[in-house]
Amino acid sequence: MHRQPPRQSFDRVLSSMCTQPHPAARAAAADFYASNPGDPETYQSIAKLEARAVSLLGSVVGDRSIDGYITSGGTESNIQAVRAARNSHPSTTPNVVAPETAHFSFSKAAEVLSVELRTVPVDETYRADIDATAAAIDANTALVVGIAGTTEHGRVDPIPELCELAHDTGARMHVDAAWGGFVLPFTSFEWSFADAPVDSMTIDPHKFGQAVVPAGGLLVRDRSLLDALATETPYLESTTQASLTGTRSGAGVASAVAAMEALWPEGYCETYERTMAIAERLADALDNRGFDTVEPHLPLVTASIPRSLFLSLREAGWRIATTAAGALRVVCMPHVTEATIDAFLADLDRLR
């Protein structure tokens, strides 16, 4: 008899930007596995829930009037943002300008959509360099990308300034807040639709939002960007479809609504404050041990440790990762506790 492997434990997971779903999200997902938001005329109950999900996301990102849909995750959302900008731009040779810290999904988008991706350097604070971005933009630029919560250092790019550069040359402005979107409302960073005339945004309920996987989000200020993605679907009750994946599971939609209704805003604020305190404590502990540590701006810590120590920690069962430059990268997601960090530091000290 075939035996399934044990369910993944999160006890030693420090590398992932996903986490344990909220109990309400888990329960809601089970009720909608077989529904398809990709055909809203047939599956009207899940279509109403998706509208509710977008409205709740609007509360998170500072504008209840935005539009959008629940995607499979940040990769789909970012590809769709590039596709919408390309489809609505007059250039026959469009390009996208993004910082070198942009998620690898933009490389996928450029390849799939035959769009030139121009990556620009970051400054000494690991944020997009404004002058370098301005130099990379030209009349063929369809989209400028800013990151609100970079995957390597948890930094927030200067979104209002990038937005001004984009709009001055007729480009769209996209913010990738896939990871940071559910913690940034409780900070002083300028990143949202309320802070700048952003055109589109990626935000993932299945990360800090604590929905089940998959539950991403693509949000747009103007419905015309979704219209630029529309494809005719003559054999469905719904006549057009803007999503990339076609058939989608309603589980992600329902769980996103359940998680946000349970946690917005007080629960997410508590999660941010707790995980940020854990990140700051870990950063101080690593710095006090003599490791070159980057000050965390969001609940993510990077520190330069010897490769041999990194590998020993992996062998001890810790699920950890590195930045492109090889520094230890620890993501303090909701499942990470003070006890988790105590155990990690104890192993680090033992293995040094």
Image: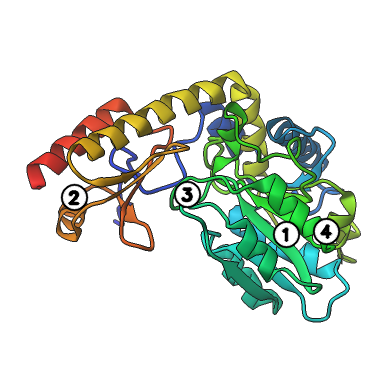
Label 2 vs label 4, nearer the camera: 4
Mark 3 or 1: in front is 3
User: Which numbered disc, 2 or 3, marks the residue that appears first in the sequence?
Assistant: 3
Asked whether 271 or 174 is in front, the reply is: 174
Does residue 253 appear in the picture of this structure?
A: yes
CB within 8 Å, label 2 to label 3: no
Q: Which residue is rendered at x = 26% and y = 27% of the image?
A: 339
C-alpha gap between disc 3 and disc 1: 26 Å
Local packing at callout 1 (Cα closer than 10 Å; few below 14, some 14-19, many 20+) is many
| Between discs 2 and 4, the one toward the N terminus | 4
Amino acid marked by disc 2? Leu
- Of the numbered discs 1 and 2, the one sitting upstream in the chain is 1
Query: At numbered mark 3, what does the secondary structure look like: helix, strand or loop?
Result: loop
Q: Are marks 2 and 4 in contact (CB under 8 Å)?
A: no
Report how far apart the C-alphas of labels 2 and 4 lie in the structure. 49 Å
The residue tagged 4 is 168
Q: If you read the primary sequence from the N terminus, does the residue marked by circle 3 or circle 1 appear first?
A: 1
Residue that label 2 marks: 313
Q: How many marks?
A: 4
Q: Nearer the viewer, residue 20 or 41?
A: 20
Q: Position of residue 14 (x, y in %)?
A: 34, 44
Q: CA distance from mark 4 to mark 1?
A: 19 Å
Q: Earlier in the sequence, mark 4 or mark 3?
A: 3
Relative height, residue 21 to residue 115 (above, below): above
Disc 4 versus disc 1: nearer the observer: 4
Label 1 to label 2: alpha-carbon separation? 38 Å
Spatial separation of the CA atoms under disc 4 and disc 3: 25 Å
Q: Which mark is residue 81?
A: 1
Residue 196's x, y, as percent? 76, 42
Q: Amino acid at mark 4?
A: Asp
- Number of other residues with Cα within 10 Å of mark 2, as a class: few under 14, some 14 to 19, many 20 or more: some
Please tell me which residue is depicted at 66% across the width and 37% down the height of the picture. 254
